[in-house]
Amino acid sequence: MYRVDDVGPRLRVLVIDDEESLRHALQKALRRHGFAVEEAATGREGAERFVGGAIDAVLTDMRLPDLGGLDLVAIFTETRPEVPVVVMTGYGSVDTALEAMRRGAKDYVTKPFAMEEVIRILERALAEQRLQRENRQLRALVERTYDPARYEAVEREIEALGAKEGAGDAPGGEVPLALREAQRRFEVRYVEDLLARTAGNIAAAARLAGISRPNFHKKLRALGIDAARFKEAARRGRTRELG
């Protein structure tokens, strides 16, 4: 599991709730797990802190004395959609929490909840955020390495084809299969090039890609690439040179 302590500077969580005792309890639990905490007692104060500060995640109550919870979720997810928002709600308001997720919230917890549950949900949401960021970074490196103009042209052609075949109507706005396969082929080329350049050294390849070693391992598994064959190829090459 992704841990806050693994990434250097403490990540900042904005806690919004009009109940002071709950804010205090959440602050203690979050700080104990390595987070920095910002607090707000109203929706307007929370929105101001979100816009004015470097916030990495939001934990907000759905019932606040001024702004509605759904309005607040909309502000956060439209302003900075990459920041995960977790909503807190009473047992009888789960439908509202589900509506918040449809509007962009990442997850929800029902009151009363265990602090461990909140920590687990936040860590999972931040791990997914980090993986998505690293995947975007890898994608950008692929495009820069392998003729970005041609890559964009291929994407446009596949998207047009997908639209003709009705692929654009896939549930949840999913990327057409043909487009995903094209992206996969480019990623395979890039990752194999990294492994060839580093003689199959996964740690070195991960550094070149600018992503963490565990996520590079995940990428290898997802793409079906065996780093050992690059090590073997490098060993054979050195043997031939010595011979």
Image: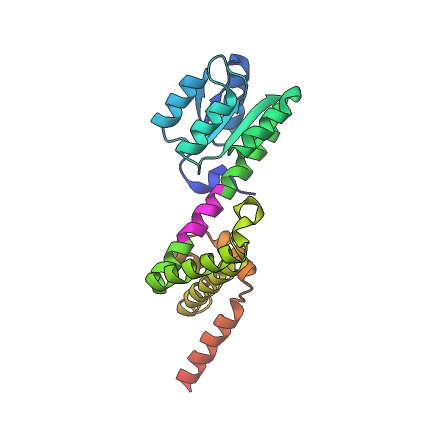
- Tell me where the magenta segment starts and ends, as one range: 129-137
Q: Confirm whether residue 134 shows in the render.
A: yes
**As drawn, is 241 to the left or to the right of 94?**
left
Quadrant, the C terminus? bottom left
Q: Is residue 135 magenta?
A: yes
Q: Quadrant of residue 154?
A: bottom left
Give the quadrant of the N terminus.
top right
| Dominant SS type (magenta) | helix
Give the colour scheme of this rendering: rainbow
Residue 114 at x, y percent in the picture = 63, 25
Q: Is residue 48 magenta?
A: no
For this rendering, which residue is in front, 134 or 197?
134
Vertical comparison of 5 with 118: above or below: below
Of residue 241 and residue 167, the one placed in the foreground of this image is: 167
Residue occupying the point 56% across, 64% down: 224
The relative height of residue 70 versus residue 201 in the rendered view (above or below) is above
Which residue is more in the foreground, 170 or 187?
170
* Rendered residue at 50%/74% (across/down): 232
Residue 190 sits in quarter: bottom left
Is residue 11 something that shows in the picture?
A: no
Residue 212 image offset from top left, x and y in percent: 45, 51
Query: At x 49% / y 55%, what residue is drawn?
Result: 163
Q: Residue furthest bottom?
A: 243
Q: Tell me residue 203's x, y (percent).
A: 45, 58
